[in-house]
Image (cartoon, grey):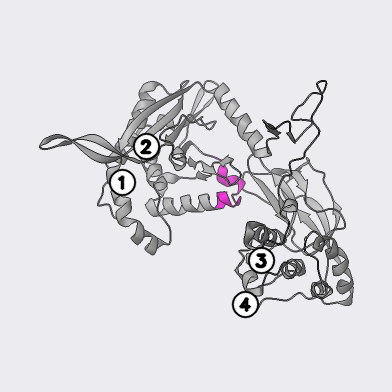
Amino acid sequence: MAQVELKMPKMGESVHEATIIRWLKNEGETIDADESVLEIATDKVDSEVPSTAAGVLIKRLFNEGDVVQVGTAIAIISTIADANSSQSASIIPAVVAPMINQVEAPVSTQIQQQVHNIVASTEGRFYSPLVRTIAAAEGVSQNILDSILGTGAEGRVTKKDILSFIESGKNGKVNAAPLAETVIANTPKPTATQNVTASNISASSMSGDFEIIEMDRMRKLIADHMVMSKHTSPHVTSFVEADVTNLVMWREKIKLSFEKREGEKITYTPVFIEAVVKAIKDFPMINISVDGTKIIIKKNINIGMAAALPSGNLIVPVIKNADRMNMVGLTKTVNDFAKRARANKLQPDEIQGGTFTITNVGTFGNVMGTPIINQPQVAILATGAIRKKPAVIETPQGDAIAIRHMMFLSLSYDHRVVDGSLGGSFLKRIADYLEQFDINREI
């Protein structure tokens, strides 16, 4: 056997350290290549660190809560040099057996013997012994196994992938309770003399009327950031209603051909971003931050787009130098960020450096909102739902009432440095660009 160091991975140019949240493996446990060993966190992103080799975790070099520099060794793994040797054959069953016991269904002797065989699928895809054992125990056929989307290196299916597949309801043999990220503990109802706080219970059913749960780490960070923003900036919000009928008709006209040509669906978000970028160029004093009594004017236009995570939390990936992208580039970037945000695959560098943020409250059917500024920026735009409404329009024959596609835009801004004239004019300019959208535009 050989020993290798598992090091804190590089997570972006501006990220130099991370905090160890939780060890997923104990010393002495087996590890597959690409299997998660621990969870780490930067300011906003939580991620898992996969093993770079298959073997046994023999030493954890840091504790949970420790802050570790990028490139520093965090664990020692004893690797299995030859999986087919007699030595490895004697080791694998011993260290894999405890993991197999996590599966609710009984494992037959024939299935246990499969642990000795590290084989590829008929299509050449590699599966670890643990994945194959779980698949066999749960009745997952080779064809179904081949169809599972893998998150490991080169698309490999990890233990987490197959357990998530089983938990999803496609196979009902596995008890989902051990797979949940958090378990609500039922603790006795406290007496009148006991103090009930979030520090001494993580989640407790107090009565039939309410329940107390502990915020997860990201929600705590969001809460602190929102409170800090309201304390830092005197918020003012302005509203404008825009007629986006031309934009809606243009998208309906080109969306099928665009998807066929580019392999991407075009949404309204890249168009909103384009309009914001144009307005920022017209009003550069929106693209600033404040440092004490100094105003810092940002030369780059980096647009943050708020995205909802499966957990219900929000994250804001940043489109760097958005003013240098055309509509195709914006569309591909927006779709990529949205997809990877839902899969918790964003890198720390991709959520930093924003100079202006857009949040689409219309996604949830809301017509308008009063968003909180994403510090240290000085303004944030909320785009409401697009709805058909009767509206007065001007024609050569006079005013008329017609059915139009209308939406509200709302801008919250820092009144320390953005007054009503600047904030209102900037918001109206965004609406103008959307209303004047060329229905015959080529893309």
| Label located before the other in sequence (2 or 3) | 3
Is 287 situated left or right of 163 in this image?
left
Span colored in magenta: 340-353
3D distance between C-alphas at marks 3 and 1:
42 Å
Q: Confirm whether the magenta stretch covers residue 341.
A: yes
Q: Residues within 10 Å of mark 1 (few under 14, many from 20)?
A: many
Residue 440 on image: x %, y %: 25, 52
- Which residue has dot 1 on it? 247
Q: Nearer the viewer, mark 2 or mark 1?
A: 1
Q: Which mark is residue 112?
A: none
| Label located before the other in sequence (2 or 4) | 4
- Which residue has dot 4 on it? 123
- Which residue has dot 3 on it? 156
Does the rendering let one see residue 443? no
Residue 140: name its quadrant: bottom right
View extreme (bottom): residue = 122
What amino acid is labelled 3 in the image?
A: Arg
Q: What residue sits 84% from the left and 73% below the top?
A: 109
| Label located before the other in sequence (3 or 1) | 3
Secondary structure at numbered mark 3: loop
Secondary structure at numbered mark 2: helix
Residue 318 on image: x %, y %: 51, 43
3D distance between C-alphas at marks 2 and 3:
45 Å
User: Where's the N terminus, which quadrant?
Assistant: bottom right
Q: Is residue 33 above or below residue 312?
A: below
3D distance between C-alphas at marks 2 and 4:
53 Å
Secondary structure at numbered mark 1: helix
Q: Nearer the viewer, mark 2 or mark 3?
A: 3
- Which residue has dot 2 on it? 281
| Label located before the other in sequence (2 or 1) | 1
Which residue occupies the foreground of this view, 322 or 125?
125
Q: Confirm whether the magenta stretch covers residue 307.
A: no
